[in-house]
Amino acid sequence: MAAHRFNGFTDYGVGIGLRIPHYRHILDRKPVVDWFEIISENFMGDGGRPLEILDRILEQYRVVQHGVSMYFGSTEPLHREHLRKLKRLVRRTGTPWISDHLCWGSVDGRYTHDLLPMPYTMAAARVAARKIREARDFLEVPIAVENVSSYAEFTVSEMTEWEFLTEVVELADCGILLDVNNIYVSSFNHGFDPRTYLDAIPAERVAQIHVAGHTRYRRCILDTHDHPVIDPVWSLYARAIRRCGRTATLLEWDDRIPSFDEVHGEALKANRYLPQAPRIHAPKANRPRIA
């Protein structure tokens, strides 16, 4: 599949999350990494060490922002001060797109700091799509929404998760951050075929892919991001790449974090499945920006 407007950055290849235990290694040794993903909320202050580190990373590497608290599924309005700080960070990093989760997590100004699954209804899809469009218009950068892992379902749902995801992104005219590990986790927990999910989503809207490890218990799987990626998840990733074409890919490893080399080596396994493309690393000043 050729590049399209949601995955046109085919030279981004494989990235990893920028995490505190690896700061010194990265700054001292300057390893070759296609790009880093940052958690936006960790860098939205007015100054201090986080922004100092980020600026040093930006001198050499491309950075993509990933958020955890816009809560597109919550019924209350978007938090305007949060958006203002986020936009300031978008301008600082030059991120070509920004992602956050298709979930809810706040009620009446109280935040759970969790990624809670939504009821799969048309009413909920319209709420999420409206907020995604509003955030995109304010931030002036493309948005991709991520499917979350889940451990419970709403009895009021009117459709499957993949039908709901499709409705939201079509109504919002936005991209998808396709987390294949989350699909695998939810498929085990809820008893559906993950291949059905992958085959149903609009491939032309997939802007980025996440892979990660998880923890399996007797009755459920938890999305812990503290293990290597298992073979069935790599198989789902290969299936996604066959549908979506070469797509920016990110390995998540957020707990019990091993050495930089181990995390990077695990991420680079994705290259086994990615179609080859010219590696063009333009100077930072000439990199494309989308407004």
Image (tube, rainbow, N blue to C red):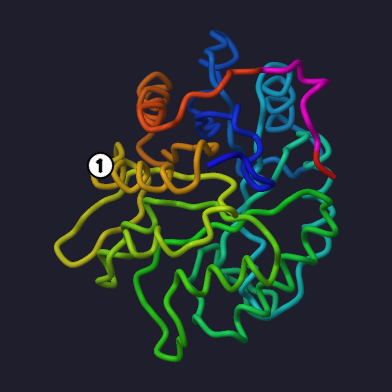
At 39% from the left edge and 27% from the top edge, which residue is drawn? 263
* Front residue of this view, candidates 84 and 206: 206
Residue type at numbered disc 1: Ile
**Residue 114 vs residue 195: left or right?**
right
Q: Is 197 part of what is drawn in magenta?
A: no
**Residue 7 vs residue 118: left or right?**
right
Reading the image, the residue beneath label 1 is 230
At 52% from the left edge and 30% from the top edge, which residue is drawn? 15
Say what secondary structure mark 1 lies in. loop
Task: Assess disc 1: are there few (<14), some (14-19) or many (≥20) residues with their C-alpha within 10 Å of its C-alpha.
Answer: few
At 54% from the left edge and 20% from the top edge, which residue is drawn? 33
Which secondary structure is most common in the magenta stretch?
loop
Q: Which residues are magenta?
A: 281-289
Figure quadrant of residue 189: bottom left
Q: Which residue is farthest bottom?
A: 156
Q: Quadrant of the C terminus?
A: top right
At 50% from the left edge and 81% from the top edge, which residue is drawn? 119
Figure quadrant of residue 151: bottom left
The answer to whether residue 49 is above or below residue 180 is above
The answer to whether residue 91 is above or below residue 11 is below
Q: Position of residue 62 (x, y in %)?
A: 67, 26
Q: Position of residue 203 (x, y in %)?
A: 52, 54
Figure quadrant of residue 4: top right
Q: Which residue is farthest top?
A: 29
Q: Position of residue 230 (x, y in %)?
A: 25, 42
Q: Position of residue 83 (x, y in %)?
A: 80, 57
